[in-house]
Image (tube, rainbow, N blue to C red):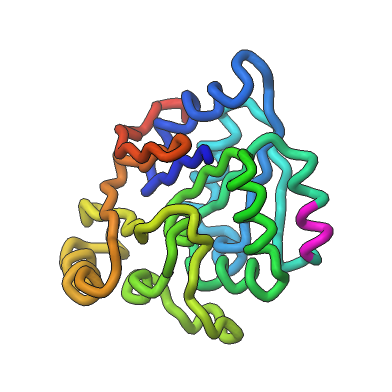
Amino acid sequence: MKLLLLSRNPGAMRPFLDGVRPGAPLRVGYIRDAQVAYAGAPFVAAERRAVEVLGHEIVDITVRDLTSSAFAATLSTVDAVYVAGGSTFALLEALTITGSDVVLAERVRDGMPYIGCSAGSIIAGPDITPASLMDDPADAPSLTEFAGLGLIDRTVIPHADGLLEPYPSSLIDETIARYGLSHRLLPLRDDQALLVDGDRETVIDSADGGDD
């Protein structure tokens, strides 16, 4: 598997995607379900811009609007997938109610490169429950199970440096104190990312690359 799990800053994205097919433009599926409730929010435009400036073609995907077979067909047309940040619970709900969570996990295990940012990184783990203090489970009223995609064996806790106003250090500390004994957690600062290449997992630098 090839995964890049970002906390916030996009610096590690360019080398990751350059390694997919060196020197050639890619089609990147942009899964935006975590952002649907935040249309017009500055962070949504900023995150989208961070992907656009890399110069690849972006294919917008709203999973909630697709059947699992249509989602699978869409994935067959892209070279990599980017799962955007926003509401972790709304994102997982969109994937599970359509059965697309299984499709996505299978494609990634078969080799499709996966980039997650914040919520997109959290759902890559085994369980999104530790995100309950950072995001609101009420965003996903039909979600009854909090199991993630299970692509890694830890739950990413993004924004762990506590520099973003909605996620102060006190909230990060409370999250780790409440869930650290019951769940395997991986706190990531906003200038860090987890790179997964096969069986190898490495926390790498992902400082803002300055492309925007």
Count of numbered circles in the view? 0
**Residue in view at x 59 percent, y 26 percent:** 20
In the rendered image, residue 135, in percent from the top left (x then y), is placed at 40, 72
Between 105 and 84, which is closer to the camera in this rendering?
A: 105
Q: Quadrant of residue 175?
A: bottom left
- Residue 68: x percent and y percent? 77, 63
- Image quadrant of residue 76? top right
Q: Position of residue 110 (x, y in %)?
A: 64, 43
Is 47 left or right of 63, judged from the image as shown? left
Most foreground residue, 208 or 61: 61
Q: Residue furthest front?
A: 199
The segment highlighted magenta reads 68-72
In this view, the residue in front, 32 or 15, is 15
Query: Which residue is rendered at x = 69% and y = 58% of the image?
Result: 103
Whether residue 17 appears in magenta in the rendering, the answer is: no
Q: Quadrant of residue 130?
A: bottom left
Q: Residue at x 69, y 38 (%)?
A: 58
Does 99 sit left or right of 73 as displayed? left
Looking at the image, is 147 positioned above or below residue 195?
A: below
Q: Give the vertical position of 3 relative to 120 (above or below).
A: above
Please indicate whether residue 207 sits to the left or right of residue 24 in the image. Answer: left
Indicate whether 146 appears above or below 11: below
Rendered location of residue 1, percent (x, y): 53, 40
Q: Main secondary structure of the magenta part?
A: helix
Q: Farthest residue toward the top?
A: 23
